[in-house]
Amino acid sequence: MVDPIELNDALERLQAFLDGADLDGAVDFLRTLHPADSAELIAELEPEQQGAVVDLLQAPELAEVFEQLDEEDMADVAQHLDVEMLADVLDEMEPDMAADLLAELEPEQAAEVLEQMEEPADVAALMTYAPDTAGGIMTAAPPSLRRFWTVTESIRFLRLHYAEEEDFFALYVLDRHARLIGLVDLKALILAEPEQTVEEIMDRTVISVRATADQEEVAQLLQRYDLVSLPVVDDEERLIGIVTIDDVVDVIEEEATEDIYHLAQMSPDSEIYSPILEAVRNRLPWLVVNLGTAFLAATVVTHFESTIAQAAVLAAFMPIVAGQGGNAGTQTMTIMVRSLALKEIAPRDTFWALWHEARVGVINGLTMGILVALIAGFWQHSPYLGLVLGLAMLSNFTIAAMAGVVVPMILKVTRVDPALASGIFVTAFTDIFGFLVFLGLATYFLQYLA
Amino acid sequence: MVDPIELNDALERLQAFLDGADLDGAVDFLRTLHPADSAELIAELEPEQQGAVVDLLQAPELAEVFEQLDEEDMADVAQHLDVEMLADVLDEMEPDMAADLLAELEPEQAAEVLEQMEEPADVAALMTYAPDTAGGIMTAAPPSLRRFWTVTESIRFLRLHYAEEEDFFALYVLDRHARLIGLVDLKALILAEPEQTVEEIMDRTVISVRATADQEEVAQLLQRYDLVSLPVVDDEERLIGIVTIDDVVDVIEEEATEDIYHLAQMSPDSEIYSPILEAVRNRLPWLVVNLGTAFLAATVVTHFESTIAQAAVLAAFMPIVAGQGGNAGTQTMTIMVRSLALKEIAPRDTFWALWHEARVGVINGLTMGILVALIAGFWQHSPYLGLVLGLAMLSNFTIAAMAGVVVPMILKVTRVDPALASGIFVTAFTDIFGFLVFLGLATYFLQYLA
């Protein structure tokens, strides 16, 4: 049994070899590790050391390393290799991973590498699909059987053609037009009698997906039907590849990260290790857009300058009304955005959601309004200040709930990612409306406040 | 080939049967569907209709339905069944799902059901593990082989004992103390010669996990090593179960949802379909805690009442400084929280992250400060207002970056979930410091502003 290694310890050992200029020792050490671990260590090295290590690895070893790296690290490692070596490495890689690596190269370089490859067909075919579709994440050509073959014939066929292939989890059955008609899982093949035909042991209810389907749809199908692999077909129902569940795990994690970063109003490409200027580019535009709405809210406040001049204490409580409304709106908006992403709710549920969230908003608004009214009223010895604050809180919570439902739904219907822009609109609403209703009420009751 | 059904159309058809009081028609229709789909439809029904449909299903059919439901829906459907029927259904279910269902029942009811079961041992054993550990999400007893068996003997053994089992993706090899010593994937078994021994075709580098390991660690291992199933062992390295990747997909989605809701400052149990009072309970406490920090910030403002009374325009720009600082701090905090969750960063990287984020903060603060200074300066014809605003923005962005790094790291080290509480502290910092520095500077330059 192998325990997963502690990567930090391993990195220190690797660094010790390299610091002692013992390149062979370093490479021998990497060879003792699981490819996932050695790939991660290589990705962590400084460029010169990385280049030196990569130079000593064989094409099949490099193929294993590349298959474990994410796209950014792929590009870094690839720059140490010349066109010929890259072509050899790509020939050894799974076609879907090879296509991902090619996509990271400069277009002319990728074309040169493709030309040098021995078997470029599978990879070139994969590169025609958009990267976030079933075609873009699928891998090519799983073993396929014909329905009239016997179990013995099928096993002989697999031995002949697929002994060297990666693991596969299911075998697909095609008709003579290469159309998908059934599925044989490996367990069924092992347990079948040698003379049974494929047709007798195959499962005809194969769930499949078109190559153009969005990767989120693919992830949902694999999850909903608890599948390990999902066949991908073209417009004529011909099998052209499969998507396996490990690709889906990455998709789910990636989509969750994107939503989290969108909700925090920054680019979904953000990474803690982004270079400084890239980090600035990933965040600054969102701050600028927000500044626009902040100035809109400031304009509202400037209309009440004479009220504030007479009762400066209002300035202290103004941000509470806007901020608490913003928090309540963000809660509703976030639950809407996540439920839309997980397909738990759809735009046709808008009225139901409005009614649901309005009640939550009114209850929370009433509770928080009374709380704020009591605290501020006693603190400032002013029941009218309490009254104005309480009413403003209740109104802003109600508006916040509406905005929290309506904004994501409108974005969804207009095919904008709700996670992308909901936050800006919802907080703009709660800021502007919060200031307006609080300062408006305060102006009305000014004689009791000043 | 079966296309995934459109659930809404199916629900309408099912409803039509039920509205026509054609219960048999409804059940026959459900039987034509994939278990994942019929389970989802049953979960959507009103309680009385659900009870009527459930009454007509057989124990093996109900077992399939339960295996597809999430925990809340499980509890709803289970209440239509008596103890005896529940025991029959549980006997048909996968042990890990059966344990999940039992956990949803009242303790006394669960005990009664366990007593009525024919084979309670596997399920009872599973129930001893915490639900968010490897033991809690594993399923029991995959087929295991002995190393000296031949391929022919192994296949005969599988036919005898495992023909009726769920799909399996790998076979594990145990020594005579039931300790895990190797793995045989099904492909290797298919391609092997009949007289080869298990020892010859097994892979000795099996990655496994302890039963007490956290489900997040399990998810990371399966992802890092691209595994479809991961064996779970006890303290003596004995195989006691496996976790499959479809469980991990659910874990990853669940953990992402929890983080998203925590970041939006609400309970991770939030659901769009929560009853109103439960929704209030999931959100109100977070708003109350936030109110505490908001009043702290208000206290700061009240100390500058005389400044604001003399230059009421300050009230309009005060929320811009605090709000923009809050946005910048939330960006940094969110990227830290997500990177910690994905193990891309650890507390030992605190100084590196501080230096990284400080530079981003200063660049963004400088840019936004200049922008705000120019807009406000020209709008209000007051270069001093611009100067005060610009300086306050720059300072608040710098503080925001520090807080955005330090707060999640402190929470991580003190074993509080960083997603849980970072937001409250970071925005408290940016509000309080933002008001303080802006109004402080304004007071200093008051003669030029009033």
Image (cartoon, coloured by chain):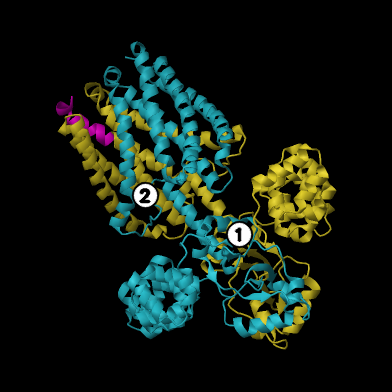
Chain colours: A cyan, B yellow
Q: Element at badge 2?
A: helix
Asked if residue B104 lies left or right of residue B375, the reply is right
Asked if residue B410 shows in the view, the reply is no
Residue under pointer 2:
B332
Residue at image coords 34%, 59%: A274
Badge 2 amino acid:
Thr
Looking at the picture, tell me which residue is in the foreground, A255 or B361. Answer: A255
Q: In the displayed image of the protein, which residue is found farthest to the top?
A: A447
Considering the whole magenta stretch, tell me its main secondary structure. Answer: helix
Q: Is residue B386 above or below residue A155?
A: above
Q: Nearer the viewer, residue A130 or B246?
A: A130
Q: Quadrant of residue B90?
A: bottom right
Q: Which residues are magenta?
A: B436-450
Q: Chain of mark 1?
A: A
Above/below status of B343 relative to A410: below
Quadrant (top left, top right, bottom left, bottom right) of the C terminus of chain A: top left
Query: Are the residues tagged 2 and 1 within 8 Å (C-beta)?
Result: no
Residue B43 marker: none
Residue B55 occupies which quadrant of the picture?
Answer: top right
- Residue tagged by mark 1? A222
- Quote the CA–CA distance across marks 2 and 1: 34 Å
Label 2: chain letter: B
**Is B306 displayed left or right of A3 in the figure?**
left
Identify which amino acid the numbered label 1 is placed on. Leu
